[in-house]
Image (spheres, grey):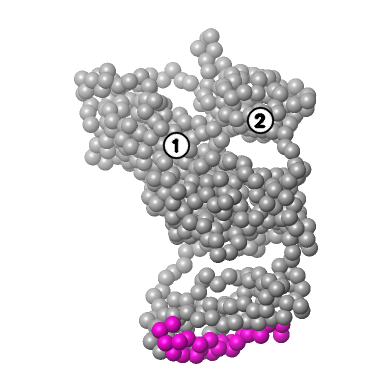
Amino acid sequence: MKTIKNILGVLLALAIMTIPYSCGDDVEYTPAEIPNSIEVYFPDSNSSKIDLSSEATSFEVTIARVKTDDAVTVPLTVTGGDGIYTIPTSVAFAQGESQSTITITYDPNVLEYDDYTEITLTIGDDTYTTFYGLSEYSFSVGIPAPWESLGMATYVDDFISAFFGISQVPYEVEIQENVLTPGLFRLINPYSPEVYPFGLNGTGTYDESQNHHLEIDARDSEGVYIRQQDTGLDWTYGNFLVWSIASYEMERNGKTLEEVKAQGDCGTYANGVITFPPSTLLCAMANYNDGEFYTANGGNWFKVVMPGVVLSDYSITIAYAGKYMGTNDQVAGIVAQINAVGEDVESVRLAVVEGTNVDTAVEAIKSGSINYVEATPQVGSVLIPFDNEPVEGRYTIVAVTYADNMAQEVSSAEFKYTPPTSETWTARYVGDYVYSKFFEGMDPGLTLYQSDSDPNRWKIENWGYGVDFIFTYDQVTGEIMVEDQEVGYVDSSLGTVYVDDLVDYTGGANYGYSYYDDDVFYFAVIYYVSNGNFDFGYETFTVTGSSAEAIQGVLSSRTSSKTTSKALINHIKRLKINELSKKEVY
């Protein structure tokens, strides 16, 4: 039996193989010398930005040390401050004390809102420093501009829901706008247990020692971004951090707002609603996989609806669900699955087009220049005939919703079409397939067939979600290549799931290659959808028999359908970014 992996159960196991969103280079490690000093350092927990209160006159900075045997006073060098802040030039540690603080004072009456000052503190004597901690701490400090409450916004999260596979439930959160910077918004503690519908999820904690507002920069309505922020939530894997790819590219890689807008990484603010394109948000947990981060909003659920805005729901979600045959035993068209449709949609027009140009297809549907199927707005399957005899290649299902005789919203789903063949096969072996990268578990007694027309072509029947697993195996050279093919499962928001050979997918053997050894086929595979991939690595098929009697015995004992044995777990919205791909992904 096999099931689709439950992300909550295998979260730590997946850390072995990840494809994080990262732009760094490998760094050569050189062991440091063993320090002999008291090892004074600035903790990583010190913030790079300190917001002051106009009603206070001081704030503290923490400094730590490793060796605590003696009382000691450590000199500090101060750079910056512009004469506004009074900063001590030393820090005193009492005997046995591992942490101490210095108090920096200021006059709030001379500070301007949002006028931040840069300050750098340095351990003033190198003999007190350590190889393993920061000897210098730079930060900006000032009084943030005041905020004005706009009321209660409707918020749909697709950060935490994306990672843990939970429902995207709209809920109300107070939203404020910066008085001095219109378009700069913040949701007030949107993940606190009192506000967030899922609270602590039974096992988590929330940091109530400070506010964890979610700030969204929408000053440019076409260039919305979210800087890295802590939600305050810890669901057993450390603080949950959120931000957007646009912010990452600007802060880490020095790109301009115009550049990230051109890349399609920014969100938009229109008609009182803030949204982001799919997979352009990021999330991470401090203690999961060394803090590596992952794309969020894969299901395109993230949304902030301003107070007073009443939305009409014209949305639709579709997926490719297979082919259907005509009366002449030829493929007549495809099956489109409507998985969700907005309550304000009056009708839906669907068409299937060759290629991936959605915009052109939408205009053709609007003008009636191509054939389309008009369907009632309800969840279910719709048959869409081909205009012409299809050829092998990429196709796209395009759906346009209508209300008040006007086109409203668009959804599309790409798929790869392979014409059926009259190829015949001969059963050669039986064996057990072990899944681990998308499905999970062993599938015993599967039959391995060899093509009658091409001896290098093989298939495992009734594999995955009830499909054939096709690969080539040259018994002379030993070369094996898994065909790029569907697994038989269609996700409600991400579309068709595919499996491919890692060599084909990446264009090389750097991540592994398929081979055969001692009655075991080792398939180096990767599972993916159109906008991301899941896990990758080796899965195996172990040959257990080859006689006709053994094959017949297995065939007679198997059920006609295995789909009832699979539990569909909503974990696959947690996609990894396509950094491995060197090919066109369907």
What stretch of residues is rendered in magenta? 71-97
Numbered label tally:
2
- Furthest toward the top, the residue is 327
The amino acid sitting under disc 1 is Ile
Identify residue for label 1.
Answer: 569
| Percent coordinates x, y for residue 242 in the rendering | 57, 55
290 or 184: nearer the eye?
184
Within 10 Å of disc 2 (Cα), the crowding (few <14, some 14-19, many 20+) is some
Left or right of 15 on screen, residue 148: right
Quarter assignment of residue 366: top right
316 or 556: nearer the eye?
316
Separation of disc 2 and disc 1 at Cα?
24 Å
Taking the spot 57% from the left edge, 22% from the top edge, the residue there is 380
| Percent coordinates x, y for residue 1 in the rendering | 33, 32
Taking the spot 23% from the left edge, 40% from the top edge, the residue there is 518
User: Taking 247 as reference, is 403 above or below it?
Assistant: above
